[in-house]
Image (spheres, rainbow, N blue to C red):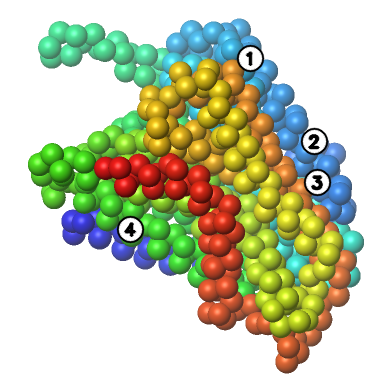
């Protein structure tokens, strides 16, 4: 790799190491029991107004069942609102490009996608949606769907931290506080930075221009910077334009590219430190951060190397790729290494944004992106839900360790028993079953083959990537697959719903169960969960679960494709 690529990688790591702990501490004060929330004088009047208008009692907490019901009710309303705006956009204002109604199956897919924080896009934004739809439907969901995931995270941590409690917080309060105190301030600052770098923010339609050669070209406009900021920091990923962050109006300069990568990663990493603060043991947060960072780093470096060494098939044909690497589907502003780093970061965070065409990556680098999602989006994962997944795997790890030494497993002083393990098993199985079943059915359907630009191993990888992305609420894609069909719009929508709610509801069940339990003091037989040994155990369990589940299908896809080059 070039010196500039290594410098960008090191700068990104340095920024994360400085900012993530500070942000994590700030968030812990917002969610933590007995903590004085910061900036009350600024935010509390706004929150109290929302509570009065929505008739929310901020002092009344909920059991896990009430918390889950509130989340589901809010999600249903969000889905209906986004679906309705799309279907009616031809009759609504702020439609300078004259967009008509979105077809039903695509409206369903998009509404589910943004409600579940997946932000999968089976459409080209600038030629499908009006400005009103982008702002009122999609951007709003970028905020509140991310806030809902963080709220569930706060509930799970409270379940681990509280003793003999029947409640885990109030969903509506957590939703409001997350949006008002965390996501809006960070997004506002980022939007200003993006504007300074050339990301556009206007209400224009298409501007017709005449090129030097005399051709006519239509230049799109729109409210991009505001959506771009929450798209990144909320690990959403749905771009205003079809080519996402490869478009210069969304991602304008190499410095802007670095800032956007930082904004994808900083909040998920910060929540590890939030966890340590909320359970009153910072060492636990350091251990979780070490797990997240280790997996992300170990996958990032090889992917960057694979892409900078170029396409093996072109090398055999005599092409010199020693300078630029594999540049197919990439922007020369960013280069192959930065594109690979973005690809690993976005597939590890359930962000789904792209600054290059993932379908054009080398087989091994593309396989790494698939693998990163198949680990369960835990390194560092989406905002809130990534930490949830890692804590579920930590519980599974201490259960396995307990079986090895012949004693009841414990995590943070809470006994892990049958009720929790049933929820853990449901959590662990929901995503793989959805991905493998839908992939198998799609491969067998001849009508699906017309959606593929490639048959053989790469075609399988395209289908596998789509369902993996949907079930992990990621949203990125191997764009060689035409997913804008009734089959894919419907089945991918179902996969998104399973990947969201079949994981969130068991998480809340575990939170409620653990909150009711006492916290036992550590003994000589307690397995410490803040040591390098524990970090290695969780990483091993994560890798083994993914390998046992997905290795056969990965072998038939990216691995076979690489060996055939």
Pointers 2 and 4 in contact (C-beta within 8 Å): no
Kindly report which numbered mark, 1 or 2, lies closer to the viewer in this rendering. 1
Q: Is residue 352 above or below residue 104?
A: below
Give the labeled residue for mark 1: 104
Give the labeled residue for mark 3: 68
Kindly report which numbered mark, 1 or 3, lies closer to the viewer in this rendering. 1
User: Of 442 and 78, which appears nearest the observer?
Assistant: 442
Q: Position of residue 162 (x, y in %)?
A: 80, 69
Q: Earlier in the sequence, mark 1 or mark 2?
A: 2
At mark 4, the secondary structure is helix
At mark 3, the secondary structure is helix
Horizontal relation, residue 319 to residue 455: left or right: left
Pointers 1 and 2 in contact (C-beta within 8 Å): no
Crowding around mark 2 (Cα neighbors within 10 Å: few <14, some 14 to 19, many 20+) is few
**Image point 44% across, 38% down: which residue?**
461
Give the labeled residue for mark 2: 73
Q: CA distance from mark 2 to mark 4?
A: 43 Å
Q: Position of residue 450 (x, y in %)?
A: 46, 18
Q: Earlier in the sequence, mark 4 or mark 1?
A: 1
Q: How many numbered circles are shown?
A: 4
Q: CA distance from mark 1 to mark 3?
A: 28 Å
Q: Earlier in the sequence, mark 1 or mark 3?
A: 3
Q: CA distance from mark 4 to mark 1?
A: 42 Å
Pointers 2 and 3 in contact (C-beta within 8 Å): no
Give the labeled residue for mark 4: 302
**Image point 78% across, 38% down: which residue?**
72
Q: Earlier in the sequence, mark 4 or mark 3?
A: 3
Horizontal relation, residue 37 to residue 218: left or right: right
Tell me the quadrant of the picture where the C terminus can be found: top left
Horizontal relation, residue 479 to residue 408: left or right: left
């Amino acid at each position: 790799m070039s010196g500039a690529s290594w410098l960008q990688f090191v700068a990104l790591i340095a920024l994360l190491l400085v900012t993530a702990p500070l942000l994590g501490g700030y968030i812990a004060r917002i969610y933590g029991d007995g903590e004085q929330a910061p900036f009350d004088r600024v935010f509390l009047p706004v929150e109290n107004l929302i509570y009065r208008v929505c008739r929310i009692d901020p002092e009344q907490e909920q059991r896990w069942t009430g918390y889950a019901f509130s989340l589901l009710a809010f999600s249903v309303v969000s889905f209906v609102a986004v679906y309705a705006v799309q279907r009616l956009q031809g009759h609504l204002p702020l439609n300078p490009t004259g967009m008509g109604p979105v077809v039903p199956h695509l409206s369903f897919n998009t509404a589910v996608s943004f409600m579940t924080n997946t932000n999968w896009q089976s459409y080209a934004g600038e030629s499908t949606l009006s400005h009103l739809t982008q702002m009122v439907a999609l951007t709003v969901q970028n905020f509140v769907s991310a806030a809902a995931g963080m709220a569930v995270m706060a509930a799970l941590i409270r379940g681990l931290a509280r003793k003999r409690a029947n409640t885990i917080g109030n969903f509506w309060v957590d939703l409001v506080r997350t949006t008002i105190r965390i996501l809006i301030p960070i997004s506002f600052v980022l939007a200003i930075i993006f504007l300074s770098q050339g990301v556009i923010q206007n209400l224009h339609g298409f501007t017709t221009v005449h090129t030097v050669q005399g051709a006519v070209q239509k230049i799109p406009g729109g409210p991009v910077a505001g959506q771009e900021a929450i798209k990144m920091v909320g690990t959403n990923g749905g771009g205003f334009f079809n080519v996402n962050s490869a478009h210069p109006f969304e991602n304008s300069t190499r410095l802007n590219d670095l800032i956007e990568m930082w904004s994808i990663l900083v909040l998920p990493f910060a929540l590890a430190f939030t966890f340590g603060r909320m359970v009153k043991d910072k060492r636990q947060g350091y251990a979780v951060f070490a797990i997240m960072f280790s997996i992300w780093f170990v996958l990032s470096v090889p992917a960057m190397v694979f892409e900078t060494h170029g396409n093996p098939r072109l090398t055999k044909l005599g092409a010199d790729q020693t300078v630029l690497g594999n540049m197919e589907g990439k922007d020369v502003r960013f280069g192959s290494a930065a594109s690979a780093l973005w690809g690993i970061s976005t597939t590890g965070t359930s962000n789904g944004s792209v600054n290059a065409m993932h379908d054009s990556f080398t087989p091994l680098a593309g396989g790494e992106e698939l693998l990163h999602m198949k680990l369960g989006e835990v390194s560092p994962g989406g905002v809130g839900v990534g930490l949830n997944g890692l804590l579920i795997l930590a519980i599974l790890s201490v259960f396995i360790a307990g079986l090895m030494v012949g004693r009841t497993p414990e995590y943070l002083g809470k006994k892990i028993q049958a009720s929790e393990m049933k929820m853990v098993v449901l959590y662990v199985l929901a995503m793989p079953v959805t991905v493998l079943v839908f992939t198998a059915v799609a491969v067998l359907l001849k009508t699906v083959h017309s959606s593929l630009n490639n048959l053989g191993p790469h075609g399988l990888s395209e289908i596998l990537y789509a369902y993996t992305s949907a079930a992990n609420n990621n949203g990125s894609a191997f764009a060689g697959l035409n997913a804008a069909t009734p089959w894919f719009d419907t089945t991918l929508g179902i996969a998104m719903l399973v990947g969201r709610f079949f994981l969130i509801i068991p998480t809340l069940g575990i939170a409620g169960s653990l909150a009711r339990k006492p916290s036992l003091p550590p003994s000589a037989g307690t397995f410490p969960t803040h040591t390098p040994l524990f970090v290695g155990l969780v990483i091993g369990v994560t890798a083994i679960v993914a390998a046992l589940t997905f290795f056969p299908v990965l072998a038939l896809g990216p691995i076979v494709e690489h060996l055939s080059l």
